[in-house]
Amino acid sequence: MATITYLTTIQFDFGALSLLPAELKKLGIAHPMLVTDRGVVAAGIAARVLETIGSAARTTVWDGTPPNPTEDAVMTAAQVYRDSGCDGLVAVGGGSSIDLAKAVALITTHPGELLQYAAVEGGVARITPKVAPLIAIPTTAGTGSEVGRGSVIVMRNGRKLGLLSPNLLPRLALCDPELTLGLPAGITAATGMDAIAHCIETFIAPSINPPAEAIALDGLRRAIGHIERATRDGSDRTARWEMMMAAMEGAMAFQKGLGAVHALSHPLGAVPGLALHHGTLNAMLLPAVLRFNAPAITAKARTLTDALGIAPGSDPAAFIEGLNQRLGLPAGLGAMGLQRAHLAGIADAALLDHCHLTNPRTATREDYLQMLDSAF
């Protein structure tokens, strides 16, 4: 039996941001908290959003989102939300700001500690429709969190865990590719590879969901066809539109589940003192995971190579390695600052991650160590 669920309302195109005042009114949000980070503020995008809101709502701004959102940051933002009398959220930024806003929407409307709502702690059933209303406005084309039902947070116990529920879906995603014009090449490449990893992992996940597979393949074709263009030329409007669509589709396909790439990248993102970028981690890990999964995905190999635009029988892992190199991404995990002393703990944590269960081939601790070594 296949259970298939979709999704949220999306306004997608250049100029979508202009719809924000009307959408706030439609959702009954009179005093939103704008959740963002200091980079988005420095780029002038937060000011642009505030100008768009204008007198339509009284807005409180919180710009303290860290690169990998933490429980401490969630609780700080939640206190600002309560103290300011906010009645909804507008998340502006990449996946970190959107994920943090989802967690704020949850913890300001639900009792107890945030940890109890993590999927691996049985939290899915505890998240009710009482979640505060959220509008998500992505400024990168990578995570697709604007249409995702998950929020990944580094908890106070050091574990990076997923909060998962259809109730965490933003009420609205305003996807305006204009907000990504001029995004630096490094961020464009890293976030774009995040979208590619999402599309590949969801396609090869073993659960039955043909609609999600079709969406993942469409997103993969768009991303492969445009990521290098978008990285070379930040003003390429067609490439920016296609990359934002690919990122959104990758997250729409999350319904199928992810796999070992994310089982590893989640704990890697929680390594203290490093603030490793999630999309870059996924790019580094993807070739090793594809090689590990190869025996379990033979029936999908021809479709995957076709979507990547390479000849039947070619090695998808080698193609991704070459793409990473052409995009100017790091040579491996070691080049990102990781130490080999971290690897054993990462392998242990991967076994406990919710994405471990939906990988097409069951991985052991030794398997994870070998994948990490290969990606190092």
Image (spheres, grey):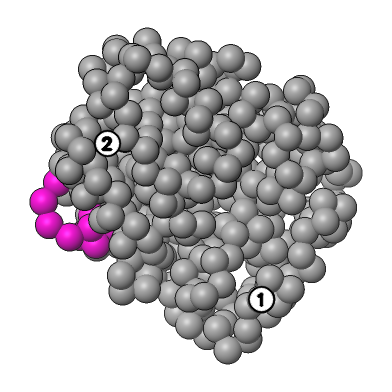
Name, please, the residue furthest toward the bottom: 341
Q: Which residue is drawn at the image coordinates 42% and 56% (left, top)?
A: 69
Taking depth in this image into account, of 155 and 34 the one nearest to the observer is 34
- Residue 359, given in percent of the width and then of the height, sits at 52, 58
Q: Identify the residue position indicated by label 2 in the image.
A: 167
* Location of the C terminus (image quadrant): bottom right
Q: Is 311 on the left-hand or right-hand side of 320?
A: right
Q: Quick check: can you spot residue 139?
A: yes
Q: What residue sits 31% from the left and 62% below the top?
A: 72
Residue 81: quadrant of the picture: top left
Does 119 sit above or below residue 371?
above
Marks 2 and 1, Cα distance to the nearest angstrom? 36 Å
Q: From the viewer's side, name the closer residue of 362 and 19.
A: 19
Counting residues from the start of the chain, the first of labels 2 and 1 encountered is 2
- Local crowd size for mark 2, using a 10 Å CA cut-off: few (<14), some (14–19), many (≥20): some
* Residue found at x 62% / y 54%: 279
Location of residue 39 in the rendering, given as x and y in whole percent from the top left corner: 56, 47
Give the percent coordinates (x, y) of residue 256: 47, 43
User: Tag 1, which secondary structure?
Assistant: loop
* Label 1 Cα neighbours within 10 Å, binned few <14 / some 14-19 / many ≥20: few
Residue lying farthest left?
A: 111
Q: Quadrant of the N terminus?
A: top left
Residue 306 visible in the shown view: no
309 vs 24, left or right, is: right
Classify 190 as above or below 269.
above
Taking depth in this image into account, of 253 and 293 the one nearest to the observer is 253
Instruction: Please give the label number shown on residue 356.
Output: none
> Which range is magenta?
110-118
According to the picture, the residue beneath numbered tag 1 turns out to be 337
